[in-house]
Structures are given as C-alpha cells and as structure tokens.
Image (spheres, helix red, strand yellow):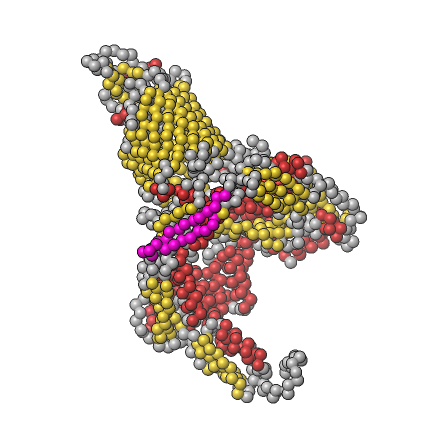
Amino acid sequence: CNPILRSHGYRYTLGQEPSIMPDEDSRDSVMQRLGNPSMRGTFDENTWFYVSATRESLAYLRPVTRDRRIVAIRFNDETGMVTDVVEYTLEDGRMVDYVSRETPTRGRELSLLEQLLGNIGRLPGQQFGGEENLPGGAGGPRRNQ
Amino acid sequence: QQTGPETAEPAVEAPAPLPVIRQILVEGNQRVEVDTVLSYLVIQPGQVADERLTNLSIHTLLATGLFSDAQIEHRGEIVLVRVMENPIINRVVLEGNQAIDDDKITDEIQAQPRAIFTLARAQSDVQRIIEVYRRSGRFAATVTPKIIEQPQNRVDLVFEISEGPVTGVRRINFIGNESFSDNRLRRELVTRESRWWRFYGSNDNYDPDRLEYDRELLRQFYQNRGYANFRVLSAVAELTPDQDSFYITITIDEGEVYNFGTVTVSTEIQDLNEDYLVALLPVREGDIFRGELIEQSIDSLTFAAGVAGYAFVNVRPVTQRDRETRTVEVEFVIDEGPRVYIERIDIAGNTRTLDRIVRRELDIVEGDAFNQVLVDRSRNNIRRLGFFEEVELEETPGSAPDRARVRVQVTEQPTGELAFGAGFSSTDSFLVDLSISERNLRGRGQFLRFRVSVSGTRETIDVRFTEPRFLDRNLAAGFDVFRVNSDFLSEASFQTASTGGSLRLGFPVTAQANLQLRYTLRNDDVQVYSTASQALRDQAGSRVTSVLGYTLNWSRLDDPIEPHNGFRFQFSQDFAGFGGDVRYVQTEFSGSYFKGLFGDVVASFNMNSGFILPWSGDSVRINDRFFKGGSSFRGFEVAGVGPRVVTRDDTTGELVRRDALGGRLYAIGSLEVNFPLGLPEQYGVRGSVFTEFGTLGLLDEGDQIDEVTGQLFTVDDLALRASAGVSIFWDSPFGPVRFDFAQAFMREDYDKAEFFRFSTRTGF
Amino acid sequence: CANGPDTSVAYVERPAELIYADAFATMERGQYQLAAAQFDEVERQHPYSEWARRSMLMAAFANYQANKYDEAVSDARRFISLHPGNRSAPYAYYLIAISYFEQIVDVGRDQQITQQALDALQQVVRRYPESRYATDARLKIDMTRDHLAGKEMDIGRWYLRRNYHLAAVNRFQNVVRDYGTTSHVPEALHRLVEAYVALGLDSEATQVASVLGYNFPGSDWYQNSYNLLTREGIAIEDAVNQRDPSFIERAMQRIFG
C-alpha cells in the first residue's frame, strides 16, 4: 500500500522560484511576489516566515514530516528594506516532547449518564444513508432541550 | 433651530414656522409606562416637530409591536401622542389536536401567555402549525385562529385545528425501469411505503420535499451504473379515493447504457504534462459511464496539480454525449485558481461531540492552501461519522485578500439506538434479539453496545466497545465481553457454555481492503449426555482457550446491498495455544464472485473452506470442530454432514445414526443463479436455482472407534456430498422470508438430509 | 422530559398582591419552578398593575434559580422591552448575563453560549458602568475571556501535538495578542518556544522565552522553557540581557496594551 503525501503551508509555484535579495527587495515587493507570510514574528513585526512542509502518512502509522522549508525574511524597521534572508530546512528541526501539563479551564463537563441516556431519542429507521438528516425524521428529543 | 435642507421642489410659499415643542403628553397607554413611550419617540421637547420626525416617531412606535395604533397631534407647543396598546394574550388554547400533543405545537408558535397579541403574529403562527402537521404527514390539516376578548385589554387566543387523515404512502410504483426491479429502486428511496408496524419512523408518510430528494437519489443511482441519459420524467402523488394515503408513481426514462468515449485533459499551465495526467485518471475509454468516476477524476487531477506545485487550480469537466455510439466524451479543463490560504478553521454546533473528534476528520489544516476538493472530502469524512444531521463547510473571507476562514457548521443528532429483532426458522424455532447502542459515546466518537439474543439453540449476551481512532491514528481498537450458551444436545449430544473476552485492532490496508488482528481469551465448559460415546465423554469439562488471530477482508462489489458484479474475499487464521489448555491452528477462507448475466439475473459462485490443525499432540475438542448443514450446506440438516457415531442394526444391517462428531476440514462450494420470478414487482418475490457441493471430515485418531458388532463406532470418510435445489425469497410486509427446497443427491448413508427449510427475520 | 412539579396553577381570579405574596412565599420555600408559575399568574391576571411589573422580574429570577435559563432570559428580555427605563432594568440585563454564564460548557465543545455570555456581560458594563452589577460583570468577563482563550489553547495544543507547527504558532499568537490578560498567556508563550525550537527557529525561541522570563519569572512555564532551551544548547542567559530593555517594554506593551 502506497503512502499518502500531503503538502501543508506555503506553496511555491514550480519553475518560478522567486529569489528575495537583501537591500533590493522591500516589504511591498516581497508582499507582491510572495503574498502574505505564513506567520510573523510573535513580537517582531519585521520578521516574515514562509513555512511549507510535506507530510507522509501510511495506513495506521502516525504521519511523518518528510521535508520542510522555512524562508525567514527580516526587514529594516524604518526603510522597510530586506536586511537578510535565512532559509531553514528539516535538518534544523528538533524533536521536542511537549509538556503534558495544561492550564486548567472551567466549564460544565457533560456527565457520562447525561450523554448516554439523554440520547436514546429515537428508534432506528432503516440505517439508510441519507435518511436521518431529512425533514420529517422520526421524533427525537425536543429541539430546544 | 434646524433648517431643512434646500430641496429641489418648486418654490412653495414657506409653511408657517413650526413652534418649538415645550411638552409631550402621552394618552391611551395602560401597561406601557409614559417614559417608555417617550424613549421610543424621535422628537424631544425643545425641538421643532417637522413632518418627517413625526412620521418617523409613529413608525418606530408601531415597530415596537406594543401598539396597534399611534397618532401624534400638534397643538401649538404641546404634542399629544395617542396610542392604542395591543392586547395581551391571556391564554393560548389549542383545540382539535390529537395526533400532535400541545407541547410540540406550543414550541413552534410565538404566541405565549402574557406576550403581546398582534394579528400578524397570529397569522404566522397559523402557518407554523400547518407546517408542523405537514412535516408529520398530515396535508389536509386546517387551522383557524379565534380571539376571545377578556377584560383589561386581554384576549384568549384559540387555534381551532382540524387535523385531517394521516396521508401515508400506500404504494410506490415505477414506470420505465427495465434493468432494475421496483423493489431494488424502492430500496434507494428514502420515502417508505406505509406498513402498520412502521409506526416509529415517520418517513412512511408523504412529504414532497422528501420526494424531491428521492429524485436526486435515483439520478445518482442510475448515473453510477452507466445510464448517462437517465431522467426522472415525473414523480406524481395521487390521493387514494378514501383520501387517507397517496399512490406515488415515478416514471423514469433509463435511456441507454453509455460508455466513456475519449477522455482528454487540457490546460494552459505549461508544467502540467497532459498525457501524464490522463494516465492518472480512474477512467478509461470504453469503461461503463459512471457519474462518480468524473468526481474522482476531478479529485485526482486537482491532487496531481497540487503535488506538481499548483495548489490553486480548478478543474472543469466538459462532457458531450453521442447518441449513436452511446458514448460520453469527457474533457477536463484545468486552469489556475486564486492563491488563497486557510488562516483559521472553526467548528460550531458541536454541543456533544468534542472539537478534536471533528477536527481530526478534516483533510485541511490551518495554514494550508485552500483546495475545494479537500474541503469536500473533509465534509464527507465528517458526514460518514453518522453523528450529525447536517454538516456544512463554509468558506468566509479572512483577514487579508489572500486569506480565507473555514467554518464547519454541524447539527448534532441522537446517536443512541434501541434495536429489536425477531425471527423464526424450521430448525432454530424462534430467535429474538435486543440491543442498546451508542455511536458517539461521551462525544468522543466511541461505540458501545449491549446485546442479548436468545434462540432455540443459542443464547448470547455480549458487550462491544470500539474506539475508531486509537491513539488518534487510522486504527480501530476495541474489546468484546461475551457469554454464549449453545445447545447441540439433539444433534451431537453436547452443550457448551463459553464465557470470555477479546481485544481487536483493525486498520485499512487499501481503499477496499482491511486487516483485523484479535486476541481472544475464553473458558469453554462442555457438558455431554451420559449416553454419548466414551470418546465424547472424555472431552467434557471446562478448558481455557487463548487464541491470537487475524482476518483479511477484501471486497470490490459494485453494490453492497444487491451485488451484480465484483467479488468479496475473506481469509482468517487463529492460533490457539498462547497459554490456555487448547492448542490448534485454524485457517478459514471464504470468497464469492458475482456476475450479472442479463437484465436483473445474477449468477454467483461461492467457496468456503476451513482447516484445524492441532499441535503438540493435542486433539481438537468437539466444540472447536466444524459442523456444517442447514443454511451452511443446503439439503442437509444442521450438523447433518460429516463424521458421526453410528451403530449397525444387527437384523437389517442398516446403520442407525447417532451423534454428529464434526470434522477438522471442510470445503463447500455453491453455484447459484438468482432471477426475478416474473410476478408483478410489488410482490417482491425472487427465485434462485442452486447447487452446493463439498465435504466435511478428518477426525483425530483418538476420536475414532472401530466397528465392533452391536457397539457404537464412528464413520468418517471425507466423501464428496452434493445437493441441488430451488430457493424462493419473499420480501414480505413482515420482513424477508426464505424457502429452500434442496435434494441431496450425493450423500453418505449416515448423513442426515433435509428437503425443506424455511426462515424469516424482522427487525424495527 | 420530566416537567417537575405541577406548574399549572388553577385559573382563579385573585387580587394581585395576594398572588404575589403566595408566589414570594413559595420562592422562599425554594420551590422555584412553582413560584415562577405563580408570578406569571400575577402578571396574567393583572397585567396593568404595579405588581405585574415586579412579578415579571421575580418570575425571571425564580426561573434562573430553577436553572430554567431559557425561560429566565426570555422573561428578563420581556421586562426590558416593556420597561427599559425602569430602575431594576440593570438587574434584568445582569440576570440575562449570568443565565448564559452558568451554561458555559467545557472548552472541547461549541462555545456559542460563552460568546453570548460575554456579549451580555459587556452590555451590563457598558449600560450601567457604576452599578454593583457592573463590578461582578467585569469579574465574569475576565473569566469568560479566559475560557475563550482556553479554547484557543486546546486547539493550539492539538495542532502542536500533531506537529502542525504553523497552525499551532498562529493559534498561540492569537492568545498572546487577543487574550493578553488571561491566565493562559504564560503557557501560550512556552508553547511558542516549544514550536520554534521544533522548527529550528532559535532566535524566535529565545526572544519569546525572554519575554516569558521577564514577565512571569516565577512561573513553571518559564522553567519549562528554560529547561528546553538549555537542553537544546540554545543560550538563554545572554539572550535576556543582550536585548535592549526597550524591546521588552514594546513586547509588554503589545501584551498588556
């Protein structure tokens, strides 16, 4: 069985590899040629990132990132000209095991019983594709319960 | 002082200068306070009340719905506002509604006690009530509102309802269908014929919207089977003379079966090589025309363009039909689409299901290029969950021209079910099963089912749980706990009570094939009749079986319900002996191949075989051995084929048949031709001619007893048995009924033949 | 569904204040649903009396106590439409807000009710900034925004754990930008550090970590970031003092702006 390949993030059109040159390109020329960046610096508006990645998933295995390309463009705050262009690839990436702790949130968790019993709303008509979501379906609990 | 704008009207002598308002008085208000009325007025003291402002005030007063009439009078510097309040509804009374109880109606209408009464609202409530009745199938319902004056400007609002009869669907007929039976087409529709026991689902009443949707379902059904020119000429519902139900007649023009003509791809994008793309298409010239293949082709082209770096393309199919050659020429035109990225995906309406359960079904991720094919595919993935009534993916503009947002709007539906089934057959006598299941447990998409089923020979209680996305991967994991009592006393004089559990893992290998791994641990307690043979009595007692197994399923059928073409294949092996007292390797294989001959006649060839090999000197116990006969080998009783304990009647030398012993090897094939019996369609009767041939046998040495005159001995010679016969299938109002007439023309003298079998099963 | 105690009250004409007194007593006894029905009765029999206006609001309160939130909201809305200028109108707006507030469900599910609660609470603060309801409403607004931020974090973490770093970074940046004052900001900053380290964007990682360290020095999240950076050999110490302080001020400005 062949793996499924999927590309995420920014998409370069083949054959027209735009090259961004420091001191020649400005914010407008980059915007015009590449469009909005995939993401900007968290606290630094003058850094633009174009992130693209390809992932491969095979049957039940967890999808794996096959390659990644990040183009980071920094601009001078006043002149708006490109100061430097840095490219990162998959090799620069690292494996990080993310902290499992989470900041707690409130909110009423539906109790198990409420979910299980609150839902025997109707007896099954024939399990036929489009039947359920059609006008006039069988009883079911009142709409605004 | 406001000076009016210079209007272009002809010069009119200036109107007398309007006085400045000093005070505004309110008259006629009973319940609404004066300052409330004033707060809605546009004119305030100190202003000049020109015509425009006065009209605007009246307009806003009326817009509040509080007043039935409002006038404003200018008396010099005093402005008098005279209002007539709308009455208040004292009580809402529904008369004449039996079929639908009050709650259901009061939910739908706006009129509530203590709310304000307006004629407009009463009229719209009448429409709402009629709509409620229409939805539950009563089209003849009429509603007349009545108002009873009450003191203090209050009214009682009475809705007099005459419900009229339930307009069910007496019969659905098709005209013009040659290649598919009425019965088969009926199965495609959502509207059902009314049956007395179908009182749960209300889909068996007449609803024009549903009939409209049925037309679409029919079109898809035919277009996926080569009928490119299929058209529904008309779908007419006539009221029966006694007015209580409808005859629905759907006239269709099937047209001819079309094949694909030349299939081409054209694009201006230079980098996309057209011949390479054509090769990718799932369509070949000459194939039978199928609508869904066009959709799939668009998918694969968009995908190929995406992989080649063109994420933003749209693919348009241009088709021409050629009536003479009955072919459909298809040209796929690919052109560059706008470069838009998805900046945010929000999921709304999931009041029960968790956000991640829906989000993991999406083929799109935030930051991806917007691709309509992936959006449609994501929508189908979510619909396939079966948790939602409606699923819509809506693209809305993002924070920049090249950004878009996707809003996934779902409407939850009840996913809990109470299922009840009953059946009867000449051998099993009765069969009853009851199950309660939940498909979306705790909003996490998990499946849980409790089931009890009792029949003549077997009682089962089992609990089944499945997590469809184990570890968030495309991996279905689950467990079962079961207790099964099976009673073969009359056939093989033994009874088993097995209790145990199993763990399962399943995943797709390809689009049409999946593999399932399982581990089962069970304890089988075998009791044996005291009169049984010594060998059998030794096998009594309880033993633990611990078995690891796998099953490979591969199915390429054109239609899961009534296959006309294609094949289905299943191969499974179980290795018992990882712990426990029982050690064997069991291999089973089953395959069926279907071929549509002509019209609605379908030939099928089925092959089933199995083999148990004990290892490390163990012998296979009776409850693990194969028993064939009854529905698994027509022409023979249940467990009527295969090794058996017998005695020889010393006077006649005849063999006297005793208990069946089962065998370690079986192989049964069957050839069947299934055809309509030419009776009018609505009887739903079909017939089939079949022949079954095969064998069962191979007892362990330990279980064999040599013939000693006057004593029990075993016979087992793995001979070929064969039978031939006719079956009648009747889709009766109570459910499918089946009659089998089979003559075992090749059999061993110790087998137990059976000429007639009958069984039925109904569920609702 | 079970419709609780018999709420159909015998239709007997009685003077308004008598029914009102009964209703009030029933409510004191804690039979809120019955009390709500009795207050309705007052209004129905004597729609123009002073008692009618008061019982409309009392019915809303009784329904709220009986957790009949939809009925409470509709009663309160009716009171506001009939008596917008009345001195207990602020209470009616407040009742609507807390009726929504108490139906907020966990972050895994649709947050439409949370948004409705936020809008209603903001209305209370906007219309009656000085009222005592406003002070409580402001407190609840923070909790509601914190909850909405929690939803963003929940989705951000889901993307991060599947290594969809771009999607995750954008979600956590939303939290920092739009929910700067909520309890989730420290974690959002740490998650950004995790994502940047995974992507290999070390300078971004140190920048975010230094803001986290500067604003939440004692928090566990900063500890996590610190451990992660040092383990990956990305110097964090010099990164903090190298940065000119004005940068931190600008960053703080952006969060708490």
Q: From the image, which quarter does the N terminus of chain C lie in?
A: bottom left
The residue range painted magenta reads: B232-255
The answer to which image quadrant residue B163 occupies is: bottom left
Q: Main secondary structure of the magenta part?
A: strand
Residue at x 37% of width, y 38% of height: B678
Locate residue B310: give its quadrant.
top right
| Residue C61 image offset from top left, x and y in percent | 42, 65
**Image height of C173 relative to A91, above or below:** below
Q: Nearer the viewer, residue B219 or B205?
A: B219
Q: Is residue B238 magenta?
A: yes
Residue at the image point whose x is 69% and y is 52% from the top: C248
Residue shown at 64%/85% (left/top)?
B12
Instruction: Indicate the quadrant where residue B703 lies.
Output: top left
**Closer-to-camera residue (C202/B644):** B644
Q: In the image, what residue occupies the spot 50% across and 59% down?
A: C117
Decide whether residue B199 is among the magenta residues: no
Visible residue check, residue B77 = yes
Q: Nearer the viewer, residue C128 or B31?
A: B31
Residue closest to the eye, C50 or A140: A140
Point out residue B133 in the picture as x, y percentages from the top left corner.
38, 59
Residue B486 percent coordinates (x, y)? 31, 30
Residue B265: give x, y in percent of width and height. Answer: 64, 40
